[in-house]
Amino acid sequence: MPVDLLLIGVKAAIFLGIWLTLVPAMVLVERRLSAFMQDRLGPNRVGPFGIVQPIADALKFFFKEDVIPHHVDKALYLLAPAAILIPSLVTFSVIPLTEPFGFSLFGQDIHFKFQIADVSIGILFVFAVASLGVYGIVLGGWASNNKYSLLGGLRSSAQMISYEIAMGLAALSVLMMAGSLSIFDIIQMQIFNGETGKLFGVLPVSGWLIFHQPLAALIFIIAVFAETNRLPFDLPEAEQELVGGYHTEYGSMKFAAFFMAEYCNMVTGSALIIALFLGGWSTLFFDPWVAGLPVFFKIFVQFSVFMTKLIVVLFFFVVVRWTLPRFRYDQLMNLGWKVFFELALLNVVITAVVIGFMSVS
Amino acid sequence: MVEYLPILVMFAIAIAMAVVILVLTHLLGPRQDDPVKLSMYESGVNPAQDSKVRFSVKFYLVAILFVLFDIEVVFLYPWAVTYKTLLSSLGWLMFWQMFIFVAVLLVGFGYVWKKGGLQWD
């Protein structure tokens, strides 16, 4: 039991390390990349190429005055940043980064799963905990007692819950193909399909679900954008209309908590996109070769592949942000309810029919 | 249930991190109160009226619709997970049962749509 607890601690440290490295890295990349896309330089003074900028930012946030305005609902106002940060730091605990492997350390055989918690409800857990983040936004918007915050909070919560349905339905067709809620099983299924599947019996076919479920993948990716309040769906904090949206009245680390939560969710969302649709640690056509490697090389390759994909998807997030203009609110809601909901449902029905024909006949 | 223990640990860590962040920033920052700084932010203009303004009832409607249809999605989950395995024993019955359920819900969805419940202006 103490070994188990130690293992949990080690895994938690590794995952938090990865995530809390990616978050400030993303902040920097976002600022630098957006600067390049707008023909500016961006932050390049703190350290070489500005790589220490996020640390400087964090320190600055810590030493800023902790302003608690008179007109706010104090308890809820302080609860909101915590309420949004906590779920975002827990959601990634069911995402596996490599296959499980065994090794012995100090005479003890350890079966190491590169995943904090191997629960059978995987995806459901991610959705359930991620939706708790809405509370932080609603509380922040309401407790700030400010018109901008209130409208931003309302917009954001309505947007997040609307796209959650499309997101859930898009994931549904993946679950039907995998027959499991566990993210590990879904990745294994993609690798297995890639190794055995043949298009028309001859052509090699990738097991990545983005090729089998392109519509679901598209809906899911767009829904992740909407869930994380990223442009083109950043209406909750549409600066020209709402100043800062639900975090208008927040300063110091309280503001940074909202920011951290958003970026954490973005990293988790990207990891989820990769796990569900981009084959996790699958290497398109080299999976059999990777599987034959010695165990530590294999784990290293799988981990690097997952991380590379993660970084590519995160870059995609930033590039999209500075490429597409913001939606209007009615367009956003129409897209969510009148287009994606139906399309996702249709996709589920089509998937059901196809699977039916494949297995019943 | 033991596989859920790490999640509990993660929640504990996350709560601890949130609390530490909020407490630290409270202790580290300077404190200079002044009435203007602590007043409501309204782009530098004096606040016009109470901030609890009336907002569109549409937001409630969306929330209610979300509850309805998200329950539907959650209801689909166990079906989706067992779909492949139960197809062999139940055959197309497995498909039609859920098809009828979704169709009934879609009738309600169509009603909401026709009534303008999804119309934002």
Image (spheres, coloured by chain):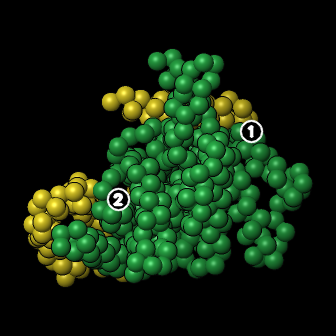
Chain colours: A green, B yellow
Q: Mark 2 = which residue?
A: A178
> Could you tell me which chain the residue with mark 1 belongs to?
A
- Tell me: residue A359, above or below residue A3: below
Q: Amino acid at mark 2?
A: Ala
Q: Mark 1 = which residue?
A: A63
Q: Secondary structure at mark 2?
A: helix
Q: Position of residue A28 (x, y in %)?
A: 74, 57
> Could you tell me which chain the residue with mark 2 belongs to?
A
Q: Amino acid at mark 1?
A: Phe
The residue under the point 39% across, 81% down is A200
Query: Around disc 1, counting alpha carbons within 10 Å, would you say few (fewer than 14), some (14 to 19), or many (20 or more)?
Result: some
The residue under the point 27% across, 56% down is B81
Q: Quadrant of residue A344?
A: bottom left
Work out whether residue B45 or residue A226 is closer to the camera in this orientation and state it: A226
* Residue A165 shows up from this direction: no
Q: Position of residue A44 (x, y in %)?
A: 86, 60
Q: Secondary structure at mark 1?
A: loop
Q: Position of residue B109 (x, y in %)?
A: 19, 74
**Disc 2 versus disc 1: distance between alpha carbons?**
49 Å
